[in-house]
C-alpha cells in the first residue's frame, strides 16, 4: 500500500509519495490517492524526496495529476534525484513540470 503525505505550504499543496519507486506497481495508487485532492488547485508541488526511480507508469501518474488540477494549474517537481531527473529530461517532461527550487521540508 502506497502512503502519501499531503501538506499546505505557501498556497501550494505539497504531495510527497513515501515510496522508493514510482512504477507500474504504485502509479495507479498514486493517481487514485492524489487526483481527488488536487481538483481545482492552481499550484501543486510533488516532492520526490523518497523516490529513487520511476518508469513510464509513474510519469503517466504525474500527467494524470496535472490533468486533474484546475485549467492552467501548475504542477512542480521538487527533490527529484538524478535518475528521476534524467528520466524527466529524456522525456521532456521537465519542460511540463518545472522544478520547485526550494527543498521540501523533511527531505533526506
Image: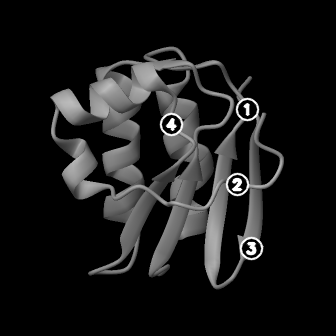
Element assignment for label 1: loop
State the CA–CA distance, disc 2 to disc 1: 13 Å
- Labels 2 and 3: the sequence-earlier one: 3
In depth, the one of 69 and 11 nearer the eye is 11
State the CA–CA distance, disc 2 to disc 3: 11 Å
CB contact under 8 Å: marks 4 and 3: no
Which percent across, then down, holds residue 17? 66, 38
Residue at 35%, 77% (x, y): give it.
73
State the CA–CA distance, disc 4 to disc 1: 13 Å
Residue annotated with mark 4: 80
* Comparing labels 2 and 1, the label whose residue is closer to the camera: 2
* Comparing labels 2 and 3, the label whose residue is closer to the camera: 2
CB contact under 8 Å: marks 2 and 4: no
Residue annotated with mark 3: 8
How many residues crowd around disc 2 within 10 Å: few (fewer than 14), some, or many (20 or more)?
some
Quadrant of the rendered image containing residue 98:
bottom left
- Labels 4 and 3: the sequence-earlier one: 3
Residue at 18%, 27% (x, y): give it.
90
Q: Is residue 81 left or right of residue 7?
A: left
Which percent across, then down, holds residue 107? 76, 42
How many residues crowd around disc 3 within 10 Å: few (fewer than 14), some, or many (20 or more)?
few
* Comparing labels 4 and 3, the label whose residue is closer to the camera: 4
Residue annotated with mark 1: 18
Residue at 57%, 42% (x, y): give it.
79
- Labels 2 and 1: the sequence-earlier one: 1
Q: Is residue 90 left or right of residue 78?
A: left
CB contact under 8 Å: marks 4 and 1: no
Which disc is residue 104 wearing?
2
State the CA–CA distance, disc 2 to disc 4: 11 Å
Residue 39 in view, yes or no: no
CB contact under 8 Å: marks 2 and 3: no
How many residues crowd around disc 1 within 10 Å: few (fewer than 14), some, or many (20 or more)?
some
Amino acid at each position: 500500500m502506497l502512503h502519501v503525505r499531503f501538506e499546505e505550504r505557501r498556497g501550494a499543496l505539497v504531495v510527497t509519495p513515501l515510496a522508493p519507486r514510482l512504477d507500474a506497481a504504485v502509479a495507479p495508487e498514486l493517481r487514485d490517492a492524489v487526483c481527488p485532492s488536487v481538483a481545482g488547485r492552481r499550484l501543486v508541488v510533488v516532492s520526490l524526496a523518497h523516490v529513487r526511480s520511476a518508469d513510464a507508469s509513474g510519469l503517466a501518474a504525474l500527467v494524470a495529476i496535472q490533468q486533474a488540477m484546475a485549467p492552467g494549474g501548475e504542477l512542480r517537481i521538487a527533490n527529484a534525484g538524478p535518475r528521476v531527473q534524467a528520466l524527466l529530461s529524456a522525456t521532456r517532461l521537465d519542460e511540463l513540470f518545472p522544478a520547485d527550487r526550494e527543498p521540501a521540508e523533511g527531505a533526506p
